[in-house]
Image (tube, rainbow, N blue to C red):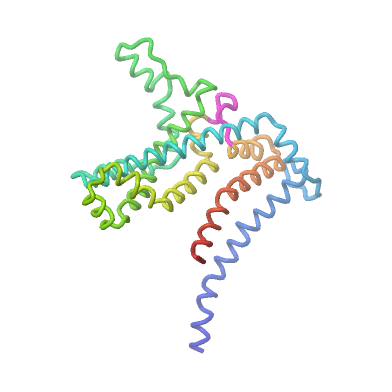
């Protein structure tokens, strides 16, 4: 009996979680995939209709705008967050005296929800009461910073808020990577007279490739599923200027009553996530086997 318990109790304990994940994650993914192949409107229909929803999706100007915004936001958000995070990590790696306090300040934005971040930046960037109003109050009457209400620049306000939120997290990842580099290698390089900056660019940073890849995966995931930050900061506006796939999906499902379109957009988003995550998982599994 004891032997049986040792073999089966772990399976029994994990079984409810396994069933819940199978049902509520993969089951609903399968349901969404099927709904995307139907003509579902306010209520789901289950008669197969083919790929009409996807044809309609990719011929919709609003979806084109959402995907273009995702490309702009994703590229800038990932690149700036990684560059800024690396710079801050290198700064803290110098063992400065107030490292703990500075690290806390940098990490603080990550403790806030995206809704709070979006609301705060909405106040900061509001031309009537934020940065523009403050600078004009100092006497610079010609100063303008109206990105929040400019359709051509509004997407960059999302980038600003997203980078502010995530740069500290990336810094923490990079700082852990910097601190994990073998100190003997660094000492040997210093003995050879290699400049400090060259040690970072030629030895330390190249050895952190797995950390860069992990940061890239996390930031890509955050960018693709961005919703609450956009809703709190711009609401998708002006017009549809800051629409992203997640806000498009929400609008189709809950404002337009078009479940088929919402489901098809959700499946395209999932395909983008898979296109990023699957190669990463493949490389990790291949490295373990090698």
At horizontal 74% and vertical 40% (from top left) the residue drawn is 53
Residue at figure coordinates x 55%, y 42% from the top left: 224
Relative to 265, does residue 274 appear above or below in the rendering? below
Query: Within the magenta stretch, is there residue 241?
Result: yes
Which residue appears at 47% of the width and 48% of the height? 218
Q: Check if residue 10 falls in the magenta segment.
A: no
Q: Residue furthest left?
A: 97
Extreme residue toward the bottom, this view: 1
| Magenta stretch in the rendered image | 235-244
Quarter where residue 137 is shown: top left
Residue 49: percent from left, percent from top: 81, 46
Q: Nearer the viewer, residue 86 or 47?
A: 86
Residue 274 at x, y percent in the picture: 59, 50
- Between 94 and 238, the one nearer to me in the picture: 94
Residue 56, by quadrant, is top right
Main SS of the magenta part reads loop
Residue that appears at 51% across and 89% down: 1
Q: In the shown orientation, is residue 240 left or right of residue 47?
A: left
Residue 211 lies, in percent from the top left, at 41, 51
Instruction: State the count of labels.
Output: 0
When the figure is inspected, residue 183 is found, relative to residue 254, above or below; the finding is below
Taking the view exactly as shown, the residue that stands out farthest to the front is 192
């Amino acid at each position: 009996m004891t032997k049986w318990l040792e073999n089966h109790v772990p399976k029994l304990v994990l079984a409810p979680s396994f069933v819940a994940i199978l049902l509520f994650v993969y089951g609903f993914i399968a349901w969404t995939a099927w709904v995307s192949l139907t003509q579902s409107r306010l209520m789901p229909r289950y008669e197969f209709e083919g790929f009409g929803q996807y044809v309609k999706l990719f011929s919709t100007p609003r979806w084109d705008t959402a995907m273009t915004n995702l490309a702009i936001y994703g590229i800038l958000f990932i690149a700036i967050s990684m560059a800024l995070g690396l710079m801050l990590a290198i700064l803290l790696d110098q063992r400065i005296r107030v490292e703990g306090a500075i690290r806390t300040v940098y990490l603080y934005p990550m403790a806030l929800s995206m809704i709070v971040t979006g609301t705060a930046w909405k106040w900061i960037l509001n031309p009537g009461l934020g940065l523009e109003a403050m600078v004009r109050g100092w006497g610079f009457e010609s100063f303008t910073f109206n990105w929040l209400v400019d359709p051509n620049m509004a997407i960059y306000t999302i980038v600003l808020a997203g980078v502010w939120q995530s740069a500290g997290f990336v810094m923490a990842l990079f700082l852990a990577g910097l601190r994990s580099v073998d100190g003997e290698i660094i000492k040997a390089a210093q003995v050879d007279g290699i400049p400090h900056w060259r040690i970072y660019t030629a030895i330390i940073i190249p050895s952190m490739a797995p950390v860069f890849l992990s940061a890239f995966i996390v930031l890509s995931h955050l960018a693709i599923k961005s919703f609450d930050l956009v809703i709190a900061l711009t609401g998708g506006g002006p017009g549809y200027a800051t629409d992203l796939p997640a806000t498009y999906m929400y609008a189709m499902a809950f404002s337009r009553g078009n479940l088929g379109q919402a489901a098809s957009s959700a499946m395209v988003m999932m395909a983008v996530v898979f296109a990023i995550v699957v190669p990463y998982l493949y490389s990790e599994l291949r490295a373990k086997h090698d």
